[in-house]
Image: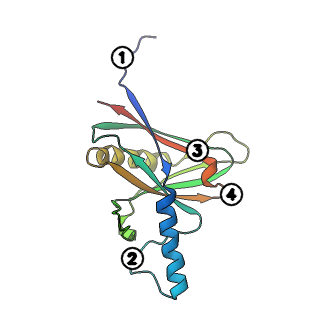
Amino acid sequence: MAEDGPKQPQLSMPLVLDEALTKQMRLRVESLKHRGEKRQDGEKLLRPAESVYRLDFTQQQKLQFERWDVVLSKPGKVTITGTSQNWTPDLTNLMTRQLLDPAAIFWRKEDSDAVDWNEADALEFGERLSELAKIRKVMYFLITFGEGVEPTDLKASVVFNQF
């Protein structure tokens, strides 16, 4: 069967665990506990099952979201939430208003090798990433791991069509 024309080149961009930023955010939680203080009004503290990931755009470019590539090596669930935060060297605190909606949720059932997802939300989220790629050098995500999944069980990337 003939194709409808030349296929656009695609770019697969991995979400990479940002260990230093995850550690820094965990230190904030520990510091508050140690000093007996509470979080700032509206501050989002990193929970134990959350990690910070990043997507590095090689250059500001016009990209069109194509799909998510998410692989879970075992059954469980991950929620990927984007942030509008551009972290600065002083690692300003993440506020809940900086979390983007909708989140993309992916899961793998016990009796399946396939990963399912909340398709409408994941597609809308992906389309927002296309817009952010025009102005960002890096995009940060909070990934929440559930039902026994850990960072070592996740391989995730976003595939874009290039113009």
Mark 3 or mark 4: which comes first in sequence? 3
Q: Going from the N terminus, do you reach mark 2 or mark 3 first?
A: 2
Label 4: state its secondary structure: loop
Q: Which mark is residue 148?
A: 4
Closer to the chain start, of discs 2 and 1, is 1
Between disc 2 and disc 1, the foreground one is 2
Residue found farthest to the top: 1
Q: Reading the chain from its start, which is encountered first: label 4 or label 2?
A: 2
- The local crowd at label 3, few if under 14, some if 14 to 19, many if 20 or more residues have their Cα within 10 Å, is some
Residue 12 has which mark?
A: none
Q: Is residue 44 above or below residue 144?
A: below
Amino acid type, label 4: Gly
Distance of mark 2 from mark 1, alpha carbons? 50 Å
Q: Which residue is mark 3?
A: 116
The amino acid sitting under disc 1 is: Asp
**Neighbourhood count class around disc 1 (C-alpha, 10 Å): few under 14, some 14–19, many 20 upward:** few
- Lower sequence index among marks 4 and 1: 1
Element marked by disc 2: loop
Mark 3 secondary-structure assignment:
strand
Label 1 belongs to which residue? Answer: 4
Q: Give me the C-alpha separation between circle 3 and circle 4.
A: 16 Å
Any mark on residue 42, and which? 2
The secondary element bearing badge 1 is classed as: loop
Q: CA distance from mark 4 to mark 2?
A: 28 Å
Q: Amino acid at mark 2?
A: Gly
Disc 2 crowd rating (10 Å Cα; few below 14, some 14-19, many 20+) is: few
